[in-house]
Image: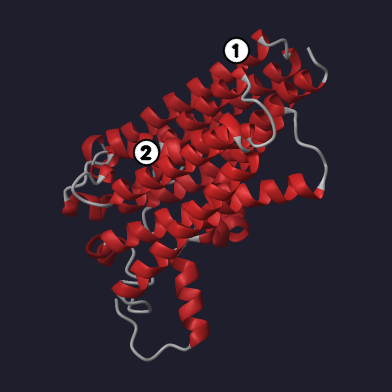
Amino acid sequence: MPVPGKFGLIDKVRAHLELLDPVTWISVFPCLAGGVMASGAMKGTAHDYLLLLAVFLMFGPMGTGFSQSVNDCFDLELDRVNEPSRPIPSGRLSEKEGLWNSIIALLLAIGTGLFLWIHIGGIRGLVILISILVALFVAYIYSAPPLKLKKNIFTSAPAVGFSYGFAPFLSGNALFGDIRPEALWLASLNFFMAVALIILNDFKSAEGDKEGGLKSLTVMIGARNTFLVSFMIIDAVFAVLAYLSFTWGFVIPAGFVLLGLVLNMVLQVQLLRDPKGGISFMKGAVEDGFGNAIGKSDVQEHNTFLRFQVANNVLFLVNNLLVAGMVGTKYIQGL
């Protein structure tokens, strides 16, 4: 609902920052870090750390920020139902101000991509530039008509998987050295993990999606079946990661990945039995400890997903980085 009254400069800045949704920025960093670790080529110099910062800013505050901002610009009517407290539907920003927010984020992301292309050069620089340009284009058509990929889960989930998982991992791998064959596999697994999680994230907007004619998986098959489909993808990601780790000669990391899979499956069984209140033992820790970071929801199924997300993300992040680090070590040692 619109918020009455005038807003000062600080209020406007906060609203612009909220439109860019800072919570989502950090989601690309584990993929970037995994890509860098798998290259085994980063040196502990100020130059390399500044390059890593630049590529994070490009995919995070600029790229992800653009995707969040442009989504709010095109989804104003839906947000009046799903998220009326967002900056534009609440009246804290005008539609024109929201548009300028997305344009500035877009131009900054493109400019950073061009700088990295010129600075790094060759195929590696081109991979980074193409990755961010495609990710930005996908972010636009995700929300903008006539394509509006978010209208159907079969187009929206792969779009998010590419922009949040595959492209950052591949760019991180190309930042300091040649793209490793193993990195393509790991980037693909990050793609599918992002797909699985975005499927569950749609719980929070199921009501508005149904009214707006958007075909999220929750709208089409219900909450419990949505959990089941997502869990099948997540478990497949863990299983393939364990198999790849073993075939690459990383036996102990493969064991850790399998342990992560078992722990995840224990939580998944509880959620499938009770989609609205499963793994309640994590409720206090998540809502009190992570609530401000990952958000809260009035939709019970979405709150159970948020509790699962914390556990799953920790398990996948640790194992993903462990395997990526082992790949990088192999190349450092020249094996």
Say which element carries label 1.
Answer: helix
Residue 281 shows in the view? no
289 relative position to 13: left or right: right
Q: How is the image coloured?
A: secondary structure
Q: Specify which label sits upstream in the sequence, 1 or 2.
A: 2
**Cα separation between marks 1 and 2:** 26 Å
Task: Assess disc 1: are there few (<14), some (14-19) or many (≥20) residues with their C-alpha within 10 Å of its C-alpha.
Answer: some
Residue 210 in percent (x, y) is at: 20, 49
Q: Tell me which residue sits at (45%, 41%) in the image.
A: 163
Q: Tell me which residue sits at (34%, 64%) in the image.
A: 83
Residue 46 in percent (x, y) is at: 80, 50
Using the image as rendered, state which of residue 302 and residue 139 is in the foreground: 139
Say which element carries label 2.
Answer: helix
Residue 257 shows in the view? yes
Locate the N terminus and report the quarter of the image it occupies. Answer: bottom left
Residue 323 in percent (x, y) is at: 69, 24
300 relative position to 41: left or right: left
Using the image as rendered, state which of residue 157 and residue 291 is in the foreground: 157
Above or below residue 67? Residue 35 is: above
Q: Which mark is residue 159?
A: 2
Residue 57 in percent (x, y) is at: 59, 54
Q: Tell me which residue sits at (64%, 30%) in the image.
A: 320
Q: Which mark is residue 223?
A: none
